């Protein structure tokens, strides 16, 4: 137990041994996954990054090794020399890739003992995530976590190989940069050498990749680290990794076609076949049909507008909404039929409560009964003709539940979009049909911020307006569309991009429409506008969240599972204790005083 490795070279990985290795002498190094003392023999399952193999220690064949094996406990680090042999008849383990062989131990050394882990490293054991994150170095030893990191590596390498074949250059951009408004708060880094000045960690390499296009690189990519100081959810982290791509002399079709090829390669590398070309939906149509610009196309439950059927209705709730410019929209839910025990009053009341919690005053409902009659608390306020036309428009059949929302157009779509997602989970509709890709295109160039009473970019301020939109930018800015596109898979946006503005005058006009003063523009974006004066090429690009993409392929629910050392939802690292206080001397050097 000296800790000095006598066998300087590991000859094989544990998980790679098979019947082809029978008779070979091997040197293995790894962790004691499990130890079983069967009286006359000790069995140790030895584990490394490729899997585990059973080793057998006999007191008669190797008394010294047997004495060492008696001291071994879970997660001890071992070096084992032995000979591969076929397992005795009837003892093979078909669930284990190495289950037909074992290693007869000739010599064993404990390279390092281990304390008893705070949780068992078995896949089937449920462990609190906070404990897993605190002892992440142990959590990563579990096969499940190791396979996720391997998948991430495969995806990253596939991206690099694909883009290399397409003539792209991988170029690194600065981590310490200038604070610019990009939609979230920046992480700031104080400068020691320039008192009172700060760097910002990049939310994305957006400006630098555009500068690279001006610099003539033409085809750039980067596996880029990005930082955003924002409130966190399961699919967000303060630092994340982005597959960042930019191209010169291209149009929207060039970029979408390239990405479909890349996605085909990525999913194939993970053993998944996908079909191209991907579906496309204009932004407005996606919101109208699915209630969101991130629609999950694995199931139906499409929104249906019935406002025109109720223009003369005497039902005050619907009439007031429609007269004020709102809409009445609904969803047909066949899975909630009485025949399946679904459309009980209790379950309907739960849906009504859910809609109320989302900020809408009510949810109306109708059940189409087996005899074709309609059961609903609102039919007494509707004419027989209105009820009949609603059922017909929504394609109601015996047993269907029709859910209706009356509200301002955007709000009605949002409420029904959330309701649609909840219903799909309850009816187990999300596990069908694998991966469904869709491009969302024809985005608005701007949106209006009611709180700040000003225009905001729908994507970012460098997005190119469509050719038809340029003449109406000042007159009807909210009608302007953009050459912008998001790629959505199973209701999750995995990436987005746009063609970029490359003309200084047009970029300057967009900045002013967003409420920036000439001085603000010069201070924040002067270097970009200066670059545009020296022959900026037409260009565009796209960026994908690598963490989110791997999460989807792996079938996980949180990106924390596919990041080696993630933060919690309070942006804390439970393993290292970051963020932490710093020494007063460091603060003084940075000219910072805490209040």
Image (spheres, helix red, strand yellow):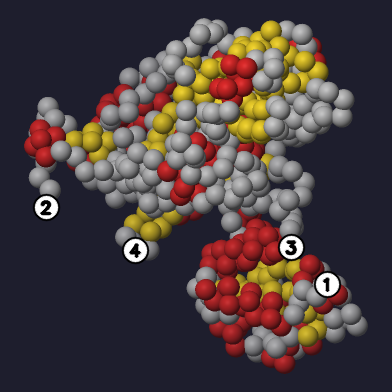
Residue position marked by numbered label 3 in the rendering: 427
First reached walking from the N terminus: tag 2 or tag 3: 3
- Residue 470's quadrant in the figure? top left
Tell me where residue 388 appears, x and y as whole percent.
81, 80
Residue 340: numbered disc: 1
In this view, which residue lies farthest toward the bottom?
380
Contact between labelled residues 4 and 2, with CB atoms less than 8 Å apart: no
First reached walking from the N terminus: tag 2 or tag 4: 4
Residue 595: numbered disc: 2
Tell me where residue 444 appears, x and y as whole percent.
50, 49
First reached walking from the N terminus: tag 4 or tag 1: 1
Few, some or many residues within 10 Å of mark 1 (<14, 14–19, 20+) = few
Q: CA distance from mark 3 to mark 1?
A: 11 Å
First reached walking from the N terminus: tag 1 or tag 2: 1
Give the camera-side residue of 508 and 22.
22
Q: Residue at x 41, y 58 (%)?
A: 448
Tell me where residue 131 appears, x and y as whole percent.
47, 47
Residue position marked by numbered label 4 in the rendering: 451
Q: Residue at x 38, y 17 (%)?
A: 215
Q: Would you place residue 544 above or below residue 476 in this image?
A: above
Q: Residue at x 11, y 39 (%)?
A: 584
Element carrying mark 3: loop
- Residue 300's quadrant in the figure? bottom right
């Amino acid at each position: 137990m000296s800790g000095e490795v006598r066998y300087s070279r590991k000859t094989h990985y544990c998980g790679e041994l098979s019947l082809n290795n029978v008779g070979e002498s091997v040197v293995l190094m790894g962790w004691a996954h499990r130890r079983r003392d069967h009286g006359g023999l000790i069995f140790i399952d030895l584990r490394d990054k490729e899997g585990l193999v059973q080793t057998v220690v006999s007191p008669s064949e190797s008394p010294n090794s047997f004495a060492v094996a008696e001291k071994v406990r879970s997660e001890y680090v071992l070096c084992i020399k032995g000979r591969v042999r076929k397992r005795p008849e009837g003892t093979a383990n078909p669930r284990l890739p190495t289950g037909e062989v074992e290693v007869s131990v000739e010599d064993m050394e404990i390279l390092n003992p281990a304390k008893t882990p705070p949780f068992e490293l078995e896949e089937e054991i449920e462990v609190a995530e906070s404990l897993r994150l605190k002892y992440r170095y142990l959590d990563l030893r579990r096969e499940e976590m190791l396979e996720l990191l391997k998948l991430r590596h495969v995806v990253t390498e596939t991206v690099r190989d694909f883009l290399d074949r397409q003539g792209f250059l991988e170029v690194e951009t600065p981590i310490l940069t200038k604070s610019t408004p990009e939609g979230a708060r920046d992480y700031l880094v104080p400068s020691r050498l320039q008192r009172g000045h700060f760097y910002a960690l990049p939310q994305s390499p957006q400006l630098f990749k555009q500068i690279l296009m001006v610099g003539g690189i033409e085809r750039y990519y980067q596996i880029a680290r990005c930082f955003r100081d924002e409130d966190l959810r399961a699919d967000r982290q303060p630092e994340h990794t982005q597959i960042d791509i930019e191209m010169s002399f291209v149009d929207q079709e060039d970029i979408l076609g390239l990405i479909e090829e890349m996605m085909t390669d990525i999913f194939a590398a993970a053993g998944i076949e996908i079909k191209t070309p991907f579906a496309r939906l204009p932004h407005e149509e996606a919101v109208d049909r699915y209630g969101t610009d991130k629609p999950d196309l694995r199931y139906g439950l499409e929104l249906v507008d019935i406002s025109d059927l109720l223009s003369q209705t005497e039902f005050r709730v619907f009439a007031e909404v429609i007269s004020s410019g709102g809409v009445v929209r609904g969803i047909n839910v066949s899975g909630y039929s009485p025949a399946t025990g679904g459309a009980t009053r209790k379950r309907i009341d739960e849906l009504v409560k859910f809609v109320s919690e989302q900020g809408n005053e009510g949810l109306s409902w109708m059940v189409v009964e087996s005899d074709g009659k309609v059961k609903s608390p609102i039919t007494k306020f509707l004419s027989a003709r209105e009820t009949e036309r609603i059922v017909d428009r929504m394609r109601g059949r015996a047993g269907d539940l029709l859910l209706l929302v009356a509200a301002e157009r955007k709000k009605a779509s949002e409420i029904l979009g959330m309701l649609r997602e909840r219903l799909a989970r309850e009816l187990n509709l999300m596990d069908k049909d694998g991966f469904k890709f869709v491009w969302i295109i024809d985005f608005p160039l701007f949106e209006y911020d009611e709180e700040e009473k000003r225009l905001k970019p729908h994507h970012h301020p460098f997005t190119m307006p469509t050719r038809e939109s340029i003449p109406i930018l000042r007159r009807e800015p909210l009608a302007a569309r953009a050459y912008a596109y998001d790629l959505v898979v199973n209701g999750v946006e995995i990436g987005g991009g746009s063609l970029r503005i490359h003309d200084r005058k047009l970029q300057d006009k967009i900045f002013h429409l967003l409420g920036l003063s000439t001085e603000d523009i010069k201070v924040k974006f002067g270097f970009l506008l200066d670059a545009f004066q020296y022959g900026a090429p037409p260009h565009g690009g796209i960026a994908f969240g690598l963490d989110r993409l791997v999460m989807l392929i792996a079938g996980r629910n949180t990106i924390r599972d596919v990041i080696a050392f993630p933060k919690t939802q309070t942006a804390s690292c439970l393993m290292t204790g970051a963020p932490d206080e710093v020494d007063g001397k460091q603060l003084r050097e940075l000219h910072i005083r805490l209040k």
